[in-house]
Every structure is written in structure tokens, then in C-alpha cells.
Image (cartoon, helix red, strand yellow):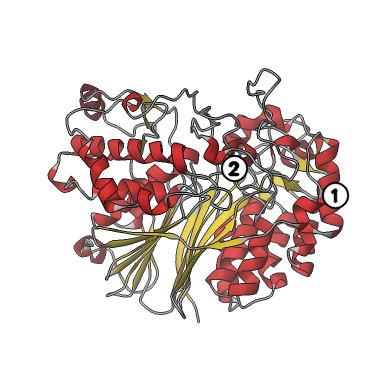
Amino acid sequence: MFNSRKILSSFVCGLVFFSGVVFAEPTNQAAIATAHPLATQAGIDILKRGGNAFDAAAAVTASLAVVEPYSSGLGGGAFWLIHRASDNKQIMIDGREKAPLRSTTNMYLDKSGDVIKGLSLNGAMAAGIPGVPAGIDHLVKHYGRLSLKDVLAPAIKQAKEGFAVTERYQTLMRYRLDVVKQYPETAQIFLKKYQMPAIDDVIIQKDLAQTLTAIANYGSRGFYQGPIAKQLVASVRHHGGIWELDDLEQYQLVEREPIIINYNGIRVTSASPPSSGGIVLGQALNILEHFKLEQHDSVTRKHIVIEAMRRAYRDRAAYLGDPDFIDIPVERLLDKDYAEGLALTINAKHATPSSELSIITTVEQTGNDTTHFSIIDAEGNRVSATLSINLPFGSGFVAKGTGVLLNNEMDDFSVKPLTANAYGLVGDHANAIAPGKRPLSSMTPTFLETEDQIGILGTPGGSRIISMVLLGVLDFEQGNSPKSWVSLPRYHHQYLPDEVQYELGGLTRAEQSRLKAKGHLLKEKNRQYGNMQAIMIWKKRNLVYAASDPRGEGLAEVFYLP
């Protein structure tokens, strides 16, 4: 399955960096791939201090909250997919945000029943109750070895000393600059005199350091109760939000059984609802299992994959939501016979218009941001985690005195049935707003396992997350390394809008011409997208490989532990 000739030709003893992929000798290896070098270093420091992968995951989560404020934070949510080597326990820790208790189904609609533009995206009304602080505490207390003080020390130091502005920071801030300027607390932290900071300007977050210190001292109670909680609620309410202290006090993580399927001999373990990731990924793979993709030319292969995406995303819109509030027909959606029926509707020569599957009105997709990291320690414990505050810099709103930048994940609900969110995704009543409910997500942290290899992968990218992971799985099946998974040209179909979206340069002109001839409407994005972080273990040779997406500024390292 794996291209051993290609790998061995570039392997030498010791630690070697080759074309963005890291190799190491088969002794006491660990690996971390994150979207920011400082977060990777925080995780390495914790492993070298005797922590395990779960301690490192908590440290990386906290560090990313400091150095990647455009992608994640204490004011957001996450899914941590974990594997504990001692007993092979695999579980998904659900730290997804929850709707405030005063939420109502129509809270973002005007008297005419129309969506109030921007209300679910900008400011205090857009924020769900965060889950990241609870997740950090849970990882350390239930799975880690070190104390919270030890684990959070790197992030606290980074918040106090600051991090340098990069081109990526500027690009994502440019997308939300007008919103950030509306909130003085946010602008004072992330801008310079209300203007875009220059490259290498230092962003210092003293209030966030104090909030992290409260969590280090008191665990999640330091965030969800006491002075920090009061400051959060007071600031949100002052700016028109509906949070109450009970929202924070009642927030609870949930450990959920992950979605597991078998695809052509690969055990695929991925996120379960309220993530749509595992079900949509699994359904698409089940459909593709009925095609011998390797026997088709590259364009026909892409066409079939697109058609599988179309059908899986159609069921996402119809059936998926928070499993604590609705009954989801998981067994039916992942049934092999059901997938075979869907596969039979795919014509290898022509695209199926989405209108033939159903008719739903949608709007144009806009922006995205999230983050992902992958970790394995020397004992074989592993973590695949995807974190988010939704759009870059979330809601644009920082709660006064806390340094906490709040999410705008309320937009991930179906604020009005069959009306698209910021990512162009549609949903029905299954994902309607309700007090205490978690919005449907596309985050897809994933493990891949065969007799000889283990893969750990995931990516940000809004609605395109699932399709990126799908392409990564198919590349893993072809025997390629993480360097290839993270570098693949990307294309996507999400049922509606009925178009094949592809990143800048993602399809050649010849591919575009042939896909159009099959009836596909194509839309090239004006930039590349995604920021995949991936690790692979080659068990028979006891080798570890890690790669960080070249589209981002992350760092993947394989290293030795004592």
C-alpha cells in the first residue's frame, strides 16, 4: 500500500527534514503538527517535560487560543478525537458551543420572518457558550499526567510576551477589519491605533493571560464561575447579548462514541454528531466503495467523487443536528446497502443536478476559518483535534477585562429553515436553534488505520473541511505520505450551491473543460484554502511522518523523547 521505495530513498539515520516532511529513527518518536510554530513548540515542551499526548493537546489548544486568534480560542469550541494506547480507548470529546438558554428559534429574524443581516455573525448576539476551556481541563484531568499549571504555562507566557504578526494574520484580519474596529476591546488588542498592525508587530494579551491563569489555578471553574464568568456575562449583556451566568455554570462537555466505518480495508474513525463530519465522510466513502476509482481516468475519478460529495451533503442538510435534541438515523445513513443505492444513481458520464435530488434555495458562500492539530506520543497515544470560533476573529467581540474573543458559531444553526449560513450550507429543522443546543458542525478530526499504517488528519475550511479530509483519505489509500495529503489540489461540492468549487489552481484547464462537458458548473475560489495538519505511522518499520499544509504557516515535527 505504501510507496516504500520513495520513502526509503529519502530516509537517513537521525532526524531529517525532506521536502516539508519530517522523518526520524524508530526510537522514542513523537510527532506534532499544528497551524502555528509556537503552538507546535508548546506541545513539544510538554511532551519533553513528561506529559503525554493529551497534556500536549491541552497545551496546544491553549497556545492556539493565544497565537491564532483568527482561528480558535477560549471563546470557541472544539472536537478532540483521542486514542489511548493503554486500553485502545477511542472517544470524541465534544466541546462544541451551546446556544444560550434565552435563545429562540427565530431570534435572528425580523418581524417579516427575514434574516437580519449580520446579527448571527457579528457581536455579542452571535456567540454561543464556549467549550474550549472545559475541554482543556477535561483532557488534563481525565487523560493527562501533568498539572493544569504546567500544561498552561507555555500559553500564559505567550500571552504575556506576545507573538509576531504575520502575513496570514493580516490577510485574515483584513477580512474582518471593519467588524473588529466596532469593538474597542478587540481593536486595542489586535490592531494598532485602529489600523492593521505591521508584519512583526507584537500582539500582547495581558487579560487573556489572566484568564488562562484562572483556569490553571481553578480548572474550568475559573472560567465558567467566579469573576471571569461575571465579566463575560456583564460585557455580553452590555453589548446586547443574551448570556446569563447559568449558561456558563451549566455548560458540560460530552464524551461521544466516534463514527467508525470500513472503507476498502481502512478503518476510518471520525467525528460524530453534532459534527456532520464523520457521517458525511463515511457516507461518501461508502458510496465510493462501489467504484473502482483506480480504473478511471483522473477526470472521471474526480467526477465520481464530486457526485458522492453531492449526495452525502444532501443528507447532511436533511437529517443532521445535535443528537441530544433530535433522533439522527445514523445506522441508515451509514448503511452499506443505502450507499449502494445512492451509488447506482451516479452516472459516470454526466453530472446529476442537485435539483433532481431536492429543491432548496441557497445563497452565496463566504469566508471561513478554524484550526486543526495532530499529535502522537512515544506510547502511541494520539489526538486529532479541530478547533473553531467560526469566521476569522469570530464575532469580532472581546468580552471586557477577559481577553476572550467570542465565537460566532450561532450562525452554524439553521437560523431560518433551508436558508444558507455563511458557508452556503443549508439545513432544515434538525439544526434549528433551541436553548442549550449545539449547532451542527463540519469539523472532521479523523484517524485512519490499516494493518501497517495509522493516519491522523484534519483541517479547517468551513463547509469544505469534509471534502478535504475525504481527498486525504483517498490519497492515503493510494499509498501516499502526509506531505501529499496536505498538498493535494482541492475541489468540493456541497449539494448547494450546485457548483464544483475548487481552490486557485485546483483544476487544470483540461480538467475544467472535461468536467464542464459532463454538466458541472465550476467556480474557482480566488485563493487556496485549507490548512491540514497530518501525521502517519508506518508500523512495520516503526517510522513516523508529519506534514503541515504549505498553504499555512504551521510546523510539523517528529522528534525523540528520553
Q: Position of residue 152 (x, y in %)?
A: 69, 65
Q: Position of residue 290 (x, y in %)?
A: 20, 48
Q: Amino acid at mark 1?
A: Gln
Q: Quadrant of residue 250?
A: bottom right
Q: Indicate the quadrant containing the N terminus: top left, top right, bottom left or bottom right.
A: bottom left
Q: Tag 2: Cα neighbours inside 10 Å, few (<14), some, or many (≥20)?
A: some
Q: Amino acid at mark 2?
A: Thr
- Residue 231: give its label: 1
Q: Nearer the viewer, residue 197 or 270?
A: 270
Q: How many marks?
A: 2
- Above or below for 398 versus 194: below
Q: Please indicate whether residue 153 sits to the left or right of residue 466 in the image.
A: right
Q: Residue furthest front?
A: 327
Q: Position of residue 558 (x, y in %)?
A: 44, 67
Q: Position of residue 239 (x, y in %)?
A: 82, 35
Please tell me whether mark 1 sits on a helix, a strand or a loop: helix
Q: Residue furthest top?
A: 112
Q: Quadrant of residue 412?
A: top right
Q: Tag 1: Cα neighbours inside 10 Å, few (<14), some, or many (≥20)?
A: some
Q: Please indicate whether residue 245 sits to the left or right of residue 32 in the image.
A: right
Q: Nearer the viewer, residue 475 or 431?
A: 431
Provide the residue designation for mark 2: 166
- Mark 1 and mark 2 lie on one chain; the one further toward the N terminus is 2
Nearest to the eye among marks 1 and 2: give it. 1
Q: Tell me the distance, in whole angstroms, between the alpha carbons under discs 1 and 2.
A: 31 Å
Q: Please indicate whether residue 154 sits to the left or right of residue 259 in the image.
A: right
Q: Please tell me which residue is depicted at 48% across the width and 33% down the height of the picture.
A: 425
Q: Please tell me which residue is depicted at 50% across the width and 52% down the height of the picture.
A: 273
